[in-house]
Amino acid sequence: MRFVNPGIDLQSSLAALQIADAHEEVFVACGVHPNDALTWNSDTLNELRKLVRHPKVVAIGEIGLDYYRDRAPKELQKRILSEQLALAADAGLPVVIHNRQATDDILELLTSWHADLVSSGSPLAERAGVLHSFSGDTVAARKALEIKFMIGISGPVTYRNADDLRRIIASLPLSALLIETDAPFLTPHPHRGERNEPAHVRWVAEKIAEIHDLPLQVVAEQTNANSQKLFNW
């Protein structure tokens, strides 16, 4: 089993790398989260360039847009996201995308970025990234698949009020899904209300197996293969 531990700013990305150096099964995504966009300065991009050279960095993330928390101006969030997408293209690394109430802008930026990957002949065009802890609709999911993004499924799929999300997952091929924790948040049922941890991904996998009417082992093997393809490990 392998884990991707994402950073949300330079400091947490460095901390994640220290953990990865101490544990063979842990890998890292480095990036600046939109809610931490105000930490971005003239040196941040160069510092990220240094971090992504580390052999345990397998993605750029968690990056994206968050119009719900609105902790930074939207134009600043979009600029920082665009700069980090360019870094991902240069490094040949997929992206882990955070999206909260910003689906249209996210898909517009990612579609343009993916088109550039295709036109440049980049192998990354076939494993562009993952929409982390997906909360969009079927149309957004299908558009993401068209530009070679996977759909990240976390604890909310187990919640009683998540019928829409379960219908979306039922409509998607298993080859498009990744299983995530978002630890310490979004703890799945029956542990909702407790601190989330990687061991709880089992409950997410079991719910996906139920939705697709497949054995748990099939879901585990396919989503593991999906992660291998995306993160190239």
Image (tube, grey):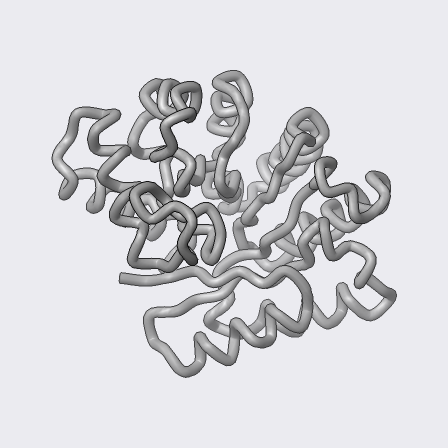
User: Which residue is at 41% across, 26% downward?
Assistant: 162
Question: Residue 183's x, y, as percent?
Answer: 45, 56
Q: Which quadrant of the view contains residue 222?
A: top left
Q: Report if residue 202 is visible in the image.
A: yes
Q: Which quadrant of the view contains residue 21?
A: bottom left
User: Which residue is at 69% across, 28% downward?
Assistant: 108
Question: Residue 111's x, y, as percent?
Answer: 64, 30
Classify 26 as above or below 94: below
In the picture, measured across the screen, residue 84 lies left or right of residue 29, that is right
The C terminus appears in which quarter of the rendering? bottom left
Q: Report if residue 112 is visible in the image.
A: no
Classify 61 as above or below 5: above
Identify which residue, 133 or 93, lies in the foreground: 133
User: Which residue is at 85% across, 40% downward?
Assistant: 75
Identify which residue, 212 or 196, lies in the foreground: 196
The N terminus appears in which quarter of the rendering? bottom left
Q: In the orientation shown, which residue stands out farthest toward the front?
A: 193
